[in-house]
Every structure is written in C-alpha cells, then in structure tokens.
Image (cartoon, grey):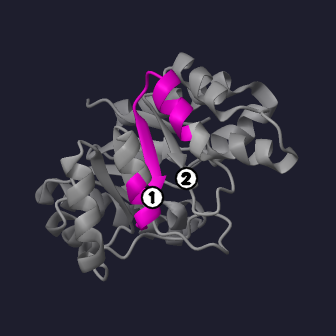
Amino acid sequence: MSYLRLGVNIDHVATIRNARGGPHPDPVHAAQLAADASADGITAHLREDRRHILDDDVERLIRDIDLPLNLEMAATEEMLGIALRHKPHAVCIVPEKREELTTEGGLDAAGQHTRLVRFCDELGAAGCRVSLFVEADPKQLEAAARLHAPVVEIHTGSYCETEGDRQKHELHRIVEAARLCDELGLECHCGHGLSFNTVGPIAAIPNITELNIGHFLIGDAIFGGIKSSIKQMRAIMDSARASGTGQANS
C-alpha cells in the first residue's frame, strides 16, 4: 500500500480574517496546527485580488512552517515573480477569474501551451515542483506532459457536486485519468470539494499520491477544531487506501 499525502489548504482561515480585518484568525497558526495534526503539506492560493491569502502570509508560511508549501497561483507575470523570489517547494498553476467565488474547473493546458511553457520552465529551473490543475481529460494530461510539468492535480469538483450515476461516471473519469498519469510519467494529485463523505473513493485510487483539501476542513473545524478535522480526514483516507474500496465512513 502506497502512502497518500494530505495537503491542507488554509486559504479560508484568511477569508475569515479578511472579512473583519486585523490579524485574527491567523492562517499561519492554522498551518502550524495542521502540521501538529500530521498534515504532509500546506497549500495556499495567492490570488490577484488578495481576497484571502496575502503576500505577508506567503513569506511567513515559508519562514515559519516546516512543512512543504504548495503555492497556488495564476499564470501571470506578477505571480511568476513572487514564486521565483520565494521558491516554494511546489507551485500549482490554476485558472483564475476575478468574479468567481472559488476556482471553477481546470486549466486549459492544451489550449495555452505557448503561454504556459515559460512558466513551467522557469519555475522548474528555480527548483519548484510544478503542478497543473486540470480536468480528468486525456487531452489536458497529455498537454501537461508536453509542458514537462512533473505533477497534475485533477479537479474533483464535478465528482463531489454530483450524486448517483453521474457521480460514478465522474469517479470513473478520475480513475482513468490517474492511470493515464502513470503511463505519461506524471505524479497525480487530486483536490477541490472533497469532504468526509466524498474522499474515500478518491483516496482508494492507488495511482493518486496526494490530496489537497481546504474549505471543508476549515468549515468542519469550526465545530470541533482543526486538529480533530484533519485527523478524521487522515483516518478516512488511510482506511480507504488500505482497503482499496473507498467505502470508509466518517
């Protein structure tokens, strides 16, 4: 059984902080608690409009947290400069629209090859592990391989937001995408919308090496604390990975 890493996204701790202003709650403190709860990494999305994570948060996360930082960012010159200055462990390039509430769907790696190739090359040369956030679409995975991005993160939003036969269809697409990643030499991660109820079948897919989960964990932490939420998610992931069935219950 291969170990499945858990990256904890702390964006929405910053969302709550920014709604009121001031320093509390501190996303860096949330990252420290996540580390104490045995998270394997921290994910933070520095958006163009700075709606949650701020530049100072990125600096403090790199300085004060021992876990690897996965910096999510759009493919813009400003963000490239920030990433090259800080050199986080990983950079996940995501699509970004100012009017969206959260990231909606995957990056069009196939249609934006000419634009993305320099970002992948420069970030990779700086020692950052480059990831592309894409749909479970063979065309996008093949494009990621041509861009020499070592990692893709499969968007799981459609799977999480559906039920019944439609959800089974979306899960099948993810299973097949993970298999294709192996064939293409891509490391396969997944994320977006995963919860206690939906994570099991994804965690059971042996080709997937990392899950990035944020909004659900931060929401659940309101009731029982972030350490408890992360430990429960970790237990469900481990049980599903061990059984290979994805039928673990919360």
**Marker disc for residue 211:** none
What residue is shown at x 59% (from left), y 65% (from top)?
163
* Res 73 seen here: yes
- Residue 102 at x, y percent in the picture: 62, 63
Q: Name the amino acid type tagged 1.
A: Met
Please tell me which residue lies in front, 52 or 146: 52
Q: Name the amino acid type tagged 2.
A: Leu
Residue identified by numbered label 1: 79
Question: Quick one: SS at disc 1?
Answer: helix
Which residues fall within the magenta stretch? 58-81
Question: Quick one: SS at disc 2?
Answer: loop
Residue identified by numbered label 2: 46
What residue is shown at x 45% (from left), y 46% (from top)?
71
> Is 50 inside the magenta-drawn segment?
no
Q: Residues within 10 Å of mark 2 (few under 14, many from 20)?
A: many
Q: Are marks 1 and 2 in contact (CB under 8 Å)?
A: yes
- Residue 233 at x, y percent in the picture: 56, 33
How far apart are labels 1 and 2 at the CA level? 8 Å
